Image (cartoon, rainbow, N blue to C red):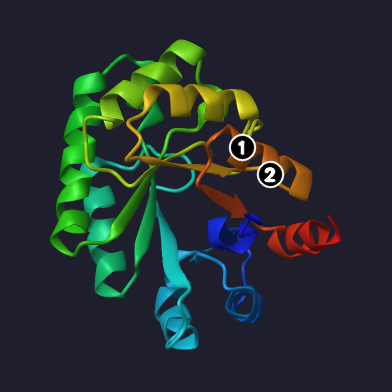
Amino acid sequence: MPLNLASYIDHTILKQTTTHAEVDRVCVEASLENFAAVCVPPKYVPDVKKLLDGSRVKVATVIGFPLGFNTLEIKVKEIENALDMGVDEVDMVINLCALKSGDWKYLETEIESCLAPVYAQRKVIKVIVESGMLTDSELVSCCKLYGNYEIDYLKTSTGYADNGATIHAVNIMRANLPNRIGIKASGGIRTFAFAKELIDAGATRLGCSASIQIMKESRAN
């Protein structure tokens, strides 16, 4: 059965200088390709909801992005605000300061608090662990922790760290997460060959800004 690559892709634009024109373009491209979602800065969520009205493409935005050290109260407020604007999916960066300090209890409290508003509206949450900054042991511990919760996806990266998605990280995640939890690979996915490798390793979503080029390459294969 042919790979429906478009159904894996979150067409993403999250640079600090993102303009209305760029968001418009991303929405048009996502509609034409029938991507899974677009992922945009929170500021643009209301505009994107209007632009994609009647489309199957979901609207995603980011929480605690890209560093993850926002206070718990701020992250919850960000999520509530995004949901009020009509977002379908939120991609939340965990508190890496807590992780590196070994404060797993804080991370439990964080995910429980952040899941509550998402659960209430039956939306989707992707939890970003920034795998390129973690040891293998830390990544396994993240899988064990977040695997205890009804999250939708564990996500490798923000795309802002030095190291983005890797086959190695996706393999670890798939081996240590319940099957019900998807894996979103993101950061540095620029070719069809790499996208396919990540999917073969177990990724069920891909966060890409080079989505159109990847689709062109996929059609040439």
Residue 6's spot in the image, x, y percent? Answer: 61, 63
- On screen, residue 132 versus residue 43, left or right, reads right
Q: Which residue lies under the disc numbered 2?
A: 196
Q: Considering the image in quadrants, where does the C terminus appear?
A: bottom right
Q: Which of 115 and 196 is in front in this view?
A: 196
Residue 168's spot in the image, x, y percent? Answer: 60, 23
The number of numbered badges drawn on the structure is 2
Q: What's the residue at 34%, 67% (across, down)?
A: 88
Instruction: Identify whether 58 is placed above or below 176.
Output: below
Residue 130's spot in the image, x, y percent? Answer: 50, 33
- On screen, residue 19 versus residue 172, left or right, reads right
Do we see residue 188 in this rendering? no
Q: Considering the image in quadrants, where does the N terminus appear?
A: bottom right
In the image, farthest residue toward the top: 137
The disc labelled 2 sits on which kind of residue?
A: Lys
Quarter residue 143 falls in: top left
The disc labelled 1 sits on which kind of residue?
A: Asp
Q: What element carries label 2?
A: helix
Residue 90's spot in the image, x, y percent? Answer: 36, 56
Q: Which residue lies under the disc numbered 1?
A: 200
- On screen, residue 10 versus residue 74, left or right, reads right
Quarter residue 72 falls in: top left
